[in-house]
Image: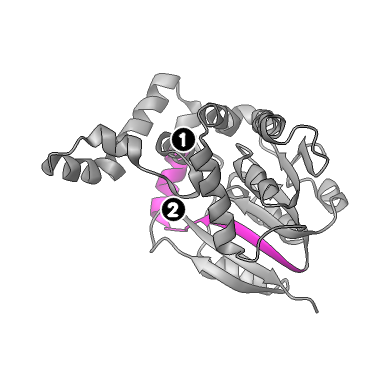
């Protein structure tokens, strides 16, 4: 599957794949276990024998987790470096496995998406809003869910003017030299994490040890997430009710929802597709 003519050129985007390459270089067994647990928390019956489509596979960590849990996995990403990350994990943990397919492609490529067929689980965590055409990407994602199957997505919350400010910051990031990018990330990190660090200091605890020991949900890492957040451009947002209405109109029922309390992070959704 190839990219779509609607895709924004790679040089105008945040280099997600480069960020993920640094992340998987230090991937630990505990992080892989956390990724598996995060999937099982949403699908407690397990993934054994199910088909799993990972749209925008990024580091490949959740494709790996799904494969570890017994799913037949198809992974793709627009960014060639992300594709290489997934291939690296496959070669490391599931070499020669015919039940895990990986390739480069775009969720905006209508014909190629249709050729993939339908899946028991379509997974796209924090990806569709980085395509430059979020609702187009949503349409192609929901169309790949088999009757009775599930759609697991995470989409940035719409905060109106605050979201517009962050869109401008992200666009600035991708146009800036590396030193300016690092500065933007550090400023963001200390703005959001400064309170926790000050509490550790006030309690006479080592703040650096706190950061080193802090475990991120889903097996992620703090600095990878900071760079992803500050630099993640293109960038679109949606209110929970907009996502709910969109999926309901396409034959889905909301199975699970986790909002971020009106904050800047992603709202997470699991939708179930009706069988009739």
Q: Nearer the viewer, residue 108 or 123?
A: 123
Specify whether 196 is left or right of 170: left
Please report the residue visible at 24 percent of the width from the left and 45 percent of the height from the top. Answer: 196
Q: Quadrant of the C terminus?
A: bottom right
Which of the two discs, 2 and 1, sits closer to the camera? 1
Please report the residue visible at 39 percent of the width from the left and 62 percent of the height from the top. Answer: 262
Can you say whether 138 is above or below 127 in the image?
A: below
Specify whether 158 is left or right of 247: left
Q: Nearer the viewer, residue 188 or 204?
A: 204
Specify whether 191 is left or right of 258: left
Q: Quadrant of the N terminus?
A: top right
Specify whether 113 is left or right of 231: right
Please give the label number shown on residue 224.
1
Can you say whether 134 is above or below 220 in the image?
A: below
Please report the residue visible at 72 percent of the width from the left and 36 percent of the height from the top. Answer: 94
Q: Which element is circle 2 on?
A: loop
Residue 122 located within the stretch drawn in magenta: no
**Residue for badge 2:** 265
Q: Quadrant of residue 88?
A: top right
Q: Which residues are magenta?
A: 148-170
On the image, the x and y values in percent for residue 54 come to 69, 48
Residue 160 located within the stretch drawn in magenta: yes
């Amino acid at each position: 599957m190839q990219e779509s003519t609607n895709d924004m050129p790679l040089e105008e985007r945040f280099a997600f794949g480069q960020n993920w390459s640094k992340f998987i270089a230090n991937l630990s067994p505990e992080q892989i276990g956390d990724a598996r647990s995060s999937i099982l928390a949403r699908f407690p019956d397990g993934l054994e024998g199910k088909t799993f489509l990972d749209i925008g596979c990024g580091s490949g960590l959740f494709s790996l987790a799904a494969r570890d849990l017994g799913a037949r996995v198809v992974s793709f990403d627009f960014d060639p470096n992300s594709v290489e990350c997934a291939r690296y994990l496959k070669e490391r943990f599931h070499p020669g496995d015919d039940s895990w397919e990986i390739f480069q492609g775009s969720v905006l490529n209508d014909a190629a998406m249709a050729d993939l067929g339908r899946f028991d689980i379509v997974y796209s965590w924090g990806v569709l809003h980085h395509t430059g055409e979020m609702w187009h990407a949503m349409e192609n994602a929901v169309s790949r869910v088999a009757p009775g199957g599930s759609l697991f997505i995470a989409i940035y919350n719409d905060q109106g003017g605050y979201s517009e400010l962050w869109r401008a910051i992200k666009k600035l990031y991708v146009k800036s030299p590396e030193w300016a990018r690092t500065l933007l990330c550090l400023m963001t990190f200390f703005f959001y994490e400064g309170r926790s660090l000050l509490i550790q200091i006030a309690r006479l605890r080592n703040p650096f040890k706190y950061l080193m020991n802090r475990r991120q949900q889903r097996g992620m890492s703090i600095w990878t997430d900071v760079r992803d957040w500050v630099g993640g451009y293109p960038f679109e947002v949606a209110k929970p009710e907009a996502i709910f209405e969109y999926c309901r109109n396409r034959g889905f029922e909301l199975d699970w929802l986790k909002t971020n309390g009106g904050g800047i992070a992603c709202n997470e959704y699991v939708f179930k597709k009706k069988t009739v």
